[in-house]
Image: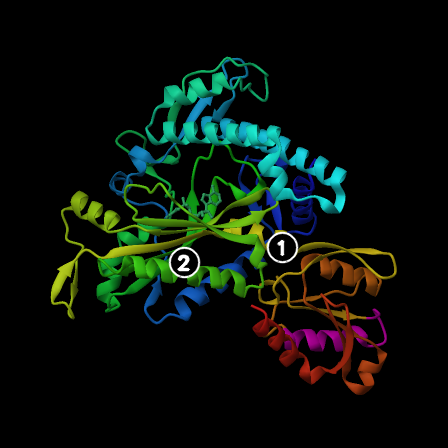
Amino acid sequence: MTNNEDKLKKIISHSKEYGFVFQSSEIYDGLSAVYDYAQNGVELKKNIRNHWWKAMVQMNENIVGIDSAIFMHPTIWKASGHVDAFNDPMIDNKDSKKRYRADVLVEDYIAKIEGKINKEVAKAAKRFGEAFNKEEFLNTNPRVIANREKMKAISKRLYGSLENNNLDDVKALIEELGIACPVSGSKNWTEVKQFNLMFATQMGSTSEGANEIYLRPETAQGIFVNYLNVQKTGRMKIPFGIAQTGKAFRNEIVARQFIFRMREFEQMELQFFVRPGEEKKWYEYWKAERMKWHLSLGMNKEDYRFHDHEKLAHYANAATDIEFDFPMGFKELEGIHSRTDFDLKAHEEHTGKKLRYFDPELNESYVPYVVETSIGLDRMFLAIMSTAYNEEKLEDGSERVVLNLPPALAPYKAAILPLMKKDGLPEKAREIMAELQENFMCQYEEKDAIGKRYRRQDAIGTPFCITIDHDSLEDNMVTIRDRDTMKQERVAVADLRQIIDAKIRNKA
Ligand code: GAP
């Protein structure tokens, strides 16, 4: 097991042990790729959502929010292209009867070659010690060069065939590479077929005559179909944006890596409506703004990169992913797309209704162009957990697991801890609790030794522990312990609110 796989496993078990994320329907042996947020997870998730909403809606006068329904008219998904093109290429193994995403089988094969290269690098680094030059080694070692070329050639063929919808060639590639079913070890494959990712259900009291409708696979279409309602009732002037957070559903076949790829997940999306011709300027603007947002949370800059798309979807004229270095490596966290007027035009065509904006400055009507930012809330949760999760060795030789969450996002801001369960300390602690919980999520704990209680709060990322002792009854002072530095300070009860508030405001 690599260190990174190890880290993901640790995050999964920490999330379960400390009440952040549970497998859905666990007592029925679980439901694959569906998760429940537990008592601490729901607070963290809500704080991330609120933080996004504040940055996008509250701080921008020209952006408003909506909350559209999950069920929508089925023709919407025809217009958006999801009925015809929201597919994954699937292949079945005839012996194990297991179904796989054909592209992922090939990608896993490529990852194995990469693994071999990494092993060669690690071996050479050990052999050459300080004199080792990784770049030079990668460019000169014949085995590494051959493997890198092999990876490139396989990728080129895979993505070329997918692009041209040449599924026979994807199957041929799987066979030529000798890829076997991970379960049965057999190479007895079916044809590759496209499989639509939308969940369908029936609307109506009986299935006879009922309409098939879909659970939305993205929240964006709820914004597009409401764009004119919002523009008119909100008297919005271009450029303006509509933001939305909410559930989306995709029947992901390769659903793994915890909450990275789920079948039911939550998106936070902005559609920003602009004048045709100005979309590239706004695309660059939102690219920069969104990266700023991530870094404002105190996330590590080196864990982020842009991946600009070279091959664009037919409706986009620019697209990039903000990738994050998850424990599984760099992967898409957020997408920013310049979607032209594709969606609004498609809805015009399918409804026969005009979705135009009259621009008083230009004295003309047009279908606005759209720049979209779309981030998975669950993926952001995982990115934050992977950054925050730390195992520390302390000076006294003991260890602690701490979640160094941005204070503004932490489920609880303070824990109120009477040193003992007697002598009036709980009563004093309750008074402080009652005052602080008006403003912050606080936790009251009087069980166990104080050290143990500190560790529990570290593990759920509480920025402050406030301890009430016998002196507190006399001088109205308490000890406040900082989660990250573990430094303790004596402060007046009257100052607590301001101290906590300053911490939350300063960092994220
Ligand atoms: N409206 C554009 C759109 O939906 P997308 O790239 O398909 O674009 C946007 O999805 C974001 O939603 C992704 O960057 C990712 O963070 C999140 N996302 C997509 N599929 C997901 C899944 N199965 N599980 C969790 N998050 C997912």
Along the line of sight, which residue is nearer the eye, 149 or 436?
149
Numbered range of the magenta stretch = 419-436
Location of residue 370 with respect to 497 vertically, above or below: above
Left or right of 151: which side holds 227?
left
Colour mapping: rainbow
**Does residue 430 show up magenta in the picture?**
yes
Q: Which of marks 2 and 1 is nearer the N terminus?
A: 2
Q: Is the stretch drawn in magenta largely helix, strand or loop?
A: helix
Residue at 34 percent of width and 72 percent of height = 61
- Res 387 label: 1
Image location of residue 56, percent across then percent down? 41, 64
- Whether residue 212 is visible, yes or no, is no
Location of residue 309 with respect to 27 vertically, above or below: below
Q: What residue does disc 2 label?
A: 287
Q: How far apart are marks 2 and 1 (CA)?
A: 22 Å
Left or right of 260: which side holds 238?
left
Q: What element carries label 1?
A: helix
Q: Which amino acid does label 1 sit on?
A: Thr
Image location of residue 15, percent across then percent down? 65, 49
